[in-house]
Image (cartoon, rainbow, N blue to C red):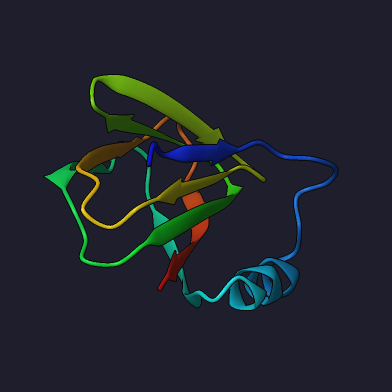
């Protein structure tokens, strides 16, 4: 299964609303933030993951393809997907991490 980028439709949801949506999809959630320039090198997880950006922007590199994820967008990753990430721009990136 390929990564799935779910673009923003409508306004960026409040954190509590986004948490409810992810919980309804079976995810356990946590909030997270990374400052400008933060980089995560290639890694993978033993769980499915959904990253929902609520503010700022991150680029995820998966199999040589860059997925640009901005406020309101979600990126779904299947367990075992090798990915790298970096915060883009001068703003802190705020996001939810859903795991199942």
Question: In percent of the image, x 83 and y 46: which residue is there?
Answer: 11
Question: In percent of the image, x 29 and y 39: which residue is there?
Answer: 85
Residue ranking furthest to the left: 42
Q: Can you see residue 43?
A: yes
Among the 4 quarters of the image, the one containing residue 9? top right
Q: Position of residue 100 (x, y in %)?
A: 40, 73
Total marks shown come to: 0
* Camera-side residue of 92 and 21: 21
* Camera-side residue of 38 and 16: 16
Q: Position of residue 25 (x, y in %)?
A: 60, 70
Q: Position of residue 52 (x, y in %)?
A: 55, 54
Position of 18 compared to 51: left or right? right
Image vertical order of residue 31 relative to residue 88, above or below:
below
Image vertical order of residue 67 relative to residue 6, above or below:
above
Among the 4 quarters of the image, the one containing residue 60? top left
Position of 91 compared to 79: left or right? right
Among the 4 quarters of the image, the one containing residue 38? top left
Position of 24 compared to 43: left or right? right
Question: In percent of the image, x 43 and y 28: which residue is there?
Answer: 67
Which quarter of the rendered picture does the N terminus lie within? Answer: top left
Residue ranking furthest to the front: 1
Q: Position of residue 43 (x, y in %)?
A: 15, 49
Position of 55 compared to 29: left or right? right
Question: In percent of the image, x 66 and y 36: which residue is there?
Answer: 7
Q: Can you see residue 89?
A: no
């Amino acid at each position: 299964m390929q990564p799935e980028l779910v673009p923003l439709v409508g306004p960026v949801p409040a954190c509590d609303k986004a948490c409810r949506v992810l919980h309804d999809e079976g995810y356990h959630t946590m909030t997270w933030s990374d400052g400008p320039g933060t980089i995560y090198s290639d890694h993978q997880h033993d769980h499915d993951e959904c990253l929902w950006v609520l503010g700022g922007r991150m680029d995820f590199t998966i199999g040589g393809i860059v997925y640009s994820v901005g406020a309101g967008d979600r990126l779904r990753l299947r367990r075992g997907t090798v990915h790298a990430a970096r915060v883009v721009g001068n703003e802190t990136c705020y996001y939810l991490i859903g795991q199942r």
